[in-house]
Image (cartoon, rainbow, N blue to C red):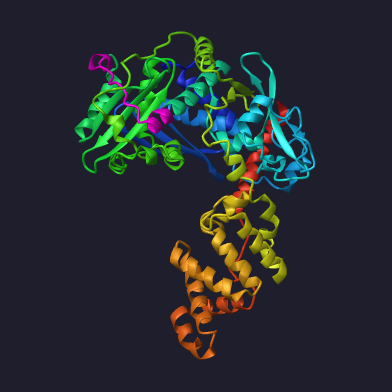
Amino acid sequence: MTEKHYIAGKDAALEDSIAKMQKQLQNLGFDIQEHAWLNPVPHVWSVHINDSSCPLLFTNGKGGSKQAALASALGEYFERLATNYFWADFYLGDNLLTQNFAHYPNEQWFPAQESSDWPEALLSKELLDFYNPSGQLQLAQLVDLNTANYEKGICTLPFKRQRDGKECLFPVNIIGNLYVSNGMSAGNSQAEARVQALSEILERFIKFKIIEEGICLPDVPQQVLEKYPDILEGIRKLEEKGFSVLVKDASLGGQFPVMNVTLLSPENQGCFASFGAHPKFFVALERSLTELLQGRELAALNEFPAPIHNLDEVASPENIETHFIDSSGLMGWSFFSDTSDYDYSPCDFEGTTNEEFIWLCELIEQTGRDIYIADYEHLGVPCCRILVPSMSEIYASEDLEWANNNVGIGLRNQILQLDALSAEDAQTLADEIDEMALDDMQPVGALIGLPLQPNTLWKDFRVAELKVLLVAISQNKDALLEGCEWLIDFSQIEEKRYKLYHCVVNRLECDDDPQYHSTMEKLYSKEIMREADQLLSGSLPSWWSTENTWQDALIEAYQKVQKAKYQS
C-alpha cells in the first residue's frame, strides 16, 4: 500500500488532493502540463503548470515537498478557474451576453445609464462611501471589462457578510479593479479554503503595512528555529551559498499570524523580503521560505535591489504594487535596524480548520472590518473568494475613477475595425484618445481586453502607435511626423515596424521628395518603402491584423467552466 503524506493545515492527504484535482481538470477538458520544477534547497520545491491549449491559463505552486508544490499549483489553478480570475483582464466575446448568465447563475444586473439613480441594492451605504468617497464615481464606470456592454449594465455578484449572513452585491468591476487575485483560494474543504484566503489577506495587509511604515521586526530565536529541522536545513543551504537569511516574527506583537524570511545578498547588496501567514506557526514560517524561492534559481537571488533610506519611495503605490506582483520591490533601511519595534510574540493557533477560520474572522472583525464571502463548488473542489474592504484591496478605491480597467471598452470596436475608418472618423478617434489622456506606452491589447500574444501585432502595439496609424489615415502629416519620432525614440517595437516609422520620418522631413527615394530604398528595402507609401497615402500597412488566437483559446476555455456552472 502506498504511503500517504499529510501536512499541517490540510484536511486530506497530498496524494488524495492531487488525484482528485487532476481528475476534475481532465473531466472539465483541461490538459495540464508541468514545467520548471525547481528544488534549489532541501525541502523547498516549486513548479509551473499550464493548460496545453491555452498558455495564459497557468499557475505556480510551492511547498516543502514535490507533492506539496504540485498540490499548491493545482489548488491555485482551481481557485482561478472557480473565481473566473483567469479571465479578469479580457473581453469574453459578443456571444457572452446571449447566454443565460455571463459570470454566475446568481448574478444580478443594474442599469448603467447616466440618467439612472444609484440602485439601492447596489452596495450598502457604508460600502458606497468607501468605494466612492468623492461622490464622483459614475455608474458607467462599474461596467465590467469581460462583458463590456453599457446597455446591459453593471453585473454584480452576491457575497455573504460573515458576521450576520446578510447578502451584499459587489460589482464585478470593483472586484477586478481593486482586489485582483487577493483573497481567493481552493481547499479540501470549505473551511480549509476560507482559512487560506483569509491568511493570504492578512499576509499581504501586514506585509504592506510593515514595508510602508518601515517597521523593524523581532528575530525568531535560534532555539525556536531548531524545532523545525527542515526549515533550518533550507536556511543553512542558502547561507552556504553566501546569502544571509533573517527570520522574523511579523505578527506585530502577537496580533496576526504572519512570519517573514528576508534574504540578503552580499554579492550585489540586494535584499528580498518574503512573508507567509497561517494560524499555525510552522505553516506560516514554511510559506515564508517557499515563497522566497518559488520559481527562482539561486542565481536569481542576486538580482534584487538594495535597501534605501527614502521611505516615501518605499511606500509609493508603484513600489507596493511591485511587492504584490513578485515581492521584488524596494525595502527601507529602517526594516533592518538592530532595534525592533515589537517584542517577539509569535502566533500559533491549534485547532481544526473550521476553528482556524472562526479565529481568523475574529481577528479581522476586531479591527472593525467586515468579511464578505462567496463560496464556489461548481468545479467539484471547494473554492472561495473573500473581500475585506479597507484591508484586502491591492489598489486604492480612487482607481475606480482614475485608473479603471474598463476605460477602453468604448474604443474596442473602432480599433478592431481600423482599416474601415474614414479620415474624419480616424481623426475623431485620435482626438478622443488624446482627451482621455491615456499613457502612450499602454499596450492597446490591455486597453481593450485582448491578450498580448507573442508573434502578433498585439504583443507590443501601444497607444502611441495606434495614434500614429489614426493620424496617418486622417492624413494629418504634422501629427504623423511627431508620432513617428516618438516611436523611434521609444524604440521598443518590432524591428520591421521601427524601420517603417524611421523611413516615414525621413520622407516627411524632405517633403517626400522623390529624388531621395532610390537611396532610401537601398537603406530601408523595397518592402519598407511600399509600407511607407501606404501609410503616407492614408492606408494601413499590410501587416495590420486583428488576429489573436489566444483570445479565441481564452473564450473556448471559459465556456468549459460555464458548462460546469450550468450543470452544478
Q: Quadrant of residue 275?
A: top left
Would you say 386 lies left or right of 525 here? right
Split into 4 quadrants, where in the image is the C terminus?
Answer: top right
Counting from the top left corner in percent of width and height, residue 512 is at: 54, 84
Farthest-out residue, front:
134
Residue 492 in sight in this render: yes
Split into 4 quadrants, where in the image is the N terminus?
Answer: top left
Note whether 347 is above or below 474 in the view shown: above
Front residue (pair 73, 509): 509
Would you say 296 lies left or right of 200 here? left
The region drawn magenta spans: 207-226
State yes or no: residue 213 in magenta: yes
Front residue (pair 142, 93): 142
The residue lying at 32 percent from left, 22 percent from top is: 341
Farthest-out residue, bottom:
515
Note whether 544 is above or below 326 in the view shown: below
Front residue (pair 104, 153): 153
The residue lying at 67 percent from left, 50 percent from top is: 409
Counting from the top left corner in percent of width and height, residue 232 is at: 26, 22
